[in-house]
Amino acid sequence: MTDSATTPGPAAHQKIDTSVPHSARIWNYWLGGKDNYPVDEEAGDAYTAVFPGIVTIARSSRAFLRRTITHLVTEAGIRQFLDVGTGLPTADNTHEVAQRIAPEARIVYVDNDPMVLAHARALLYSTPEGATAYVDADVHDTERILAAAAETLDFTRPTALILSNILGHVADYEQARSIVTRLMDALPSGSYLAVNDGSLGIDPVFEQAQDAYNDSGAVPYILRTVDQITAYFDGLDLLEPGVVSVPHWRPDPGSPAAEPVAEHGGLARKP
């Protein structure tokens, strides 16, 4: 762990509530992780009983993250990453993918869940040449995110902003767009934005399962249309193939053709 710091915030003193399912823990369960509780497994199993395809979506989302980061490091020369809405560590976390290729890469993770904070040490493990840090902040608090991240990242240099399955937790769509704008405004020309989120209007069974989840008492996650997800990239230069179902974004050479899923994402460069 080199040149790393955890910046505590409001969630640092919260207790982990094991009586209510939590999206990060459920996602961890679907990905095969162990950082979850019986209430999360029950919620996850109830969801998959209605829509088994959610496991494919979760794994496709993680694969999309790996491919975008690989492109950013190898093709775009990016060495700084701001990953907002980190979730619980699983396989191929942002720093693992980036530093495997470029050991000098610097990564700041942002989340405000107390269980994620408890795992910050795992997230903060860095190569000697690079750095990782964790910021305890809510996605809405962009000023805090940027101020704390600037302790590790140099915002005069191109930086990749990663927003993976987090904007759906912002209930108001215009507010979600405003968050993207405020964060990207702080980054210089040559920076990148990667977004992927659950998509509306693709799979009615998925939508039925998500509605039931949102009514369960857990923090809601709002599916958005492909046009709405695409609008997050307004003013930026979208890379080919644009905003697509995540398995179709630059699949690995030689990989079998994948069916589309109701999760769309893209990658764009700031002019």
Image: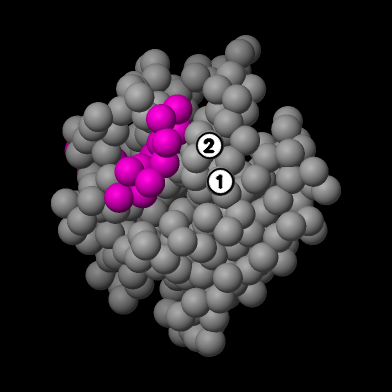
x%, y% of residue 238? Answer: 34, 23
On screen, 12 above or below 178? Answer: below
Q: Quadrant of the C terminus?
A: top left
- Please name the residue that numbered disc 1 is placed on: 154
- Which amino acid, by three-letter code, is at mark 2? Arg
Rate crowding at label 2 as few (under 14), some (14 to 19) or many (20 or more) other CA atoms within 10 Å: some
Q: Are marks 2 and 1 in contact (CB under 8 Å)?
A: yes
Label 2 sits on a secondary structure element that is loop
x%, y% of residue 256? Answer: 56, 17
Q: Residue furthest front?
A: 156
Task: Kindly tell me whether residue 197 is visible in this rendering.
Answer: no
x%, y% of residue 52? Answer: 44, 48
* Residue sitting nearer the eye, 63 or 37: 63
Cα–Cα gap, marks 2 and 1: 6 Å
On screen, 80 above or below 134? Answer: above
Q: In the rendered image, which quarter is residue 53 located in? A: top left
- Please name the residue that numbered disc 2 is placed on: 157
Label 1 sits on a secondary structure element that is loop
x 31%, y 72%: residue: 216
x 52%, y 57%: residue: 149
Q: Quadrant of the N terminus?
A: bottom right
- Which amino acid, by three-letter code, is at mark 1? Asp
* Colour setting: one colour
As for residue 196 lying within the magenta part, the answer is: yes
**Which residues are the magenta region?**
182-203
Rate crowding at label 1 as few (under 14), some (14 to 19) or many (20 or more) other CA atoms within 10 Å: few
x%, y% of residue 39? Answer: 49, 76
In screen coordinates, is 124 left or right of 22?
right
x 20%, y 56%: residue: 175
As for residue 26 lying within the magenta part, the answer is: no
Q: In the rendered image, which quarter is residue 69 located in? A: top right
